[in-house]
Image (cartoon, rainbow, N blue to C red):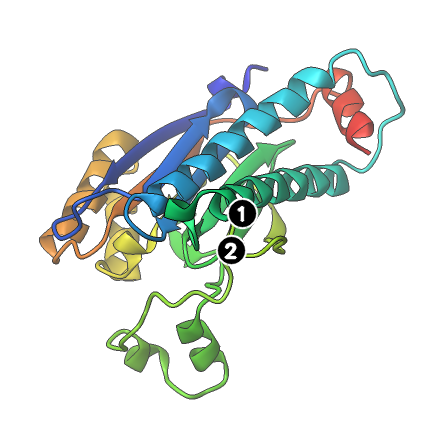
Amino acid sequence: MDLKQAFDIATCTDPGIVRAHNEDSIAADAANGLVVLADGMGGYNAGEVASGIATTVITTEVARALAAAAGHAKEDEDRRAATENLVREQVLKANTSIYQAAQSQPQYAGMGTTLVLCLFYDNRVMVAHIGDSRVYRLRDGVFMQVTRDHSLLQEQIDSGLITREQAKHAQHKNLVTRALGIDPTVEPEIHDYDAKPGDVYLLCSDGLCDMVTDDDIGLTVQALGANLKLAVQQLVQMANDNGGRDNVSVILVRILREYPANRGVVSKFFAWLK
């Protein structure tokens, strides 16, 4: 099956009301079941460069790995472990590219980016993230956050210093404890989940979840889920209506049908990765 037939994908990114530049970057490759979102940080335009490198490197390298696997006939191996290795390797390549650019070009010194991605394969989804960009899932009417922020605020919540209610009004919400491109190496947090037809996955930068409550995000996705293009536009508009203090980016993915791995070609690919 062509993976494009298994998903409905819509994207939207906007600079917001306050910021002059959009330092977010998004990419969707339906044929390979991949969506990527990055929220850049740094000096003038540097964040835009960092996030752009992240999305470009990851989408390009995943596609290249898939293409290179064709014709490699080996025994079937653990797809889940192979997929995790694939994701980690491409994230580390992106980290190296951003770090080296920052080291070699003074105008990019200190740039970095958050990252969140979903790779859909064999009726599953591999989720990787660094920083405070998020993934949510709507399943059977239940909307929940899948990722857990790498942020100072989340650490304070976890340690009991503040409550979740207090966190809504806290200062310095955007201090991340992990970012792509800041150090020579980084460890992405990677988890694997089952996926089924009807699921809707939402990827967003903090420009959405800082300005719109989870409840309102979930209600909007439920109400407009039949028209994902309208849904992403409405979510961005809600963030801007509430102040639009940051760039805001949203990707929505609805699973239309099952997408089991081809036990011939795809199994050879995952075996080749090992």
Q: Quadrant of the C terminus?
A: top right
* C-beta proximity under 8 Å, tags 2 and 1: yes
Residue at image coords 55%, 15%:
2
Pick whichever, 198 or 207, lies toward us.
Answer: 207
Residue denoted by label 1: 99
Q: Earlier in the sequence, mark 2 or mark 1?
A: 1
Q: Position of residue 160 (x, y in %)?
A: 46, 87
Q: How many marks?
A: 2
Q: Position of residue 5 (x, y in %)?
A: 48, 18
Q: Is residue 7 visible?
A: yes
Q: Quadrant of residue 154?
A: bottom left
Q: Position of residue 224 (x, y in %)?
A: 24, 39
Q: Secondary structure at mark 1?
A: helix
Compared to 225, does 110 lie above or below? below
Q: Secondary structure at mark 2?
A: loop
Residue at image coords 20%, 37%:
233
Residue 12 placement, left or right of 155: left
Residue at image coords 54%, 47%:
99
Residue denoted by label 2: 182
What amino acid is labelled 2 in the image? Ile
Residue 29 placement, left or right of 208: right
Pick whichever, 40 or 108, lies toward us.
Answer: 108
Q: Position of residue 1 (x, y in %)?
A: 59, 15
Residue 122 placement, left or right of 79: left
Single out the residue that lies furthest toward the right: 75
